[in-house]
Amino acid sequence: MSAAARDTFPDGFFERADPSPDAEFYDQPRLVTHIDDRAIAAVAQLYDELGLTGDVLDLMSSWVSHFSTRPASLTVLGLNAVELDANPMADRRVVLDLNFEPVLPFADSSFDAVVNCVSIDYLVHPVEVLAEVARILRPGGLSVCTFSNRLFPTKAVRGWLAVDEDVRPQVVATYHRLAGAYDEPVVQQRLTATWRHDPLWAVWARRLP
C-alpha cells in the first residue's frame, strides 16, 4: 500500500474476506455480463461522450468491452485468457493480476484512455495502479472508472463494502487524487437504481501535461 493511501484510509480498508490469489478465483471463465443492458448502454454512451476513440486500454477486462464503436486500438488486460480471447473488439490481450503486481507492462505515454468497468472495487493497491495508469497515459489522456452495486463480496475490499453506495464515487476520486498527475476528478451518477435496473456511477480524470 502506498504511504498516501495508508495515511488516508483506515487500517484494514484494503483487506478482503477472501485473500487467496485472484488467479485462482478467476480460473474458470465467466462469459456473463456483470451489469444489466441499460447500464451497459450507459457505459457505452459515456465512452462516446468522452471521445474514447484512439488507443485505449480496458483494465481488468473480460470477454466484452462496452464500446458502441470499436476504438482505433483496444488492449484488454484481465485475469482469464479464455475471456480475453473471446473479446471481439480486442487487438491485444494481456493476462495479469494487478493485485499481485500493480505494475502495467506498457511504455510511458502509450494510451489515449484507460477504462475500468465494474472492477475498481477489487483492487487492493488502487492508488499504485492509478499512478501506473497516469504513467502510461499520454498528456491529456483519460482514466475512466465506471461501477454499479453488483460485486463479488468476498473479493471486494472491506472499505468498499463498508461505505454507502453514494460515498463510493468519492473513494474512487480520492484514489485519483492520491495517485497524482491528474486534474480534479469528475464524479457523476449516470443511472439511478430501480427495482428492475442497476445504478451506474462514473469517475474520470485527465492526465496532466
Image (cartoon, rainbow, N blue to C red):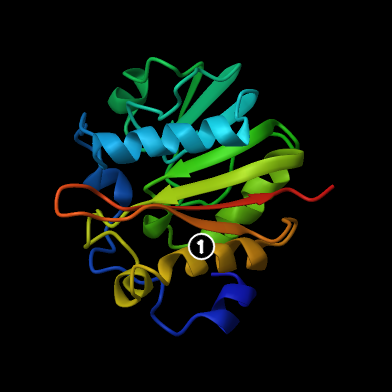
Residue at the image position 44 percent from the left and 22 percent from the top: 68
Name the kind of residue labelled 1 in the image.
Val
Could you say which is closer to the camera, residue 129 or residue 58?
A: 58
- Quarter of the view holding residue 149: bottom left
Tell me, yes or no, if residue 188 can be seen here.
Answer: yes
Compared to 67, does 188 lie above or below? below
> On screen, 92 above or below 208?
above
Residue 152: percent from left, percent from top:
22, 55
Vertical comparison of 14 with 43: above or below: below
Q: Nearer the viewer, residue 24 or 125?
A: 125
Give x and y (percent) for residue 131: 65, 55
Give the x, y percent position of residue 29.
Answer: 21, 31
List x then y, in percent, for residue 23. 31, 44
Left or right, 123 with reference to 133: left
Say left or right for 195 vs 15.
Answer: left
Q: Quadrant of residue 186?
A: bottom right
User: Which residue shows up at 52% across the image and 34% down it?
Assistant: 47
Q: Which residue is mark 1?
A: 172
Q: Residue furthest left?
A: 195
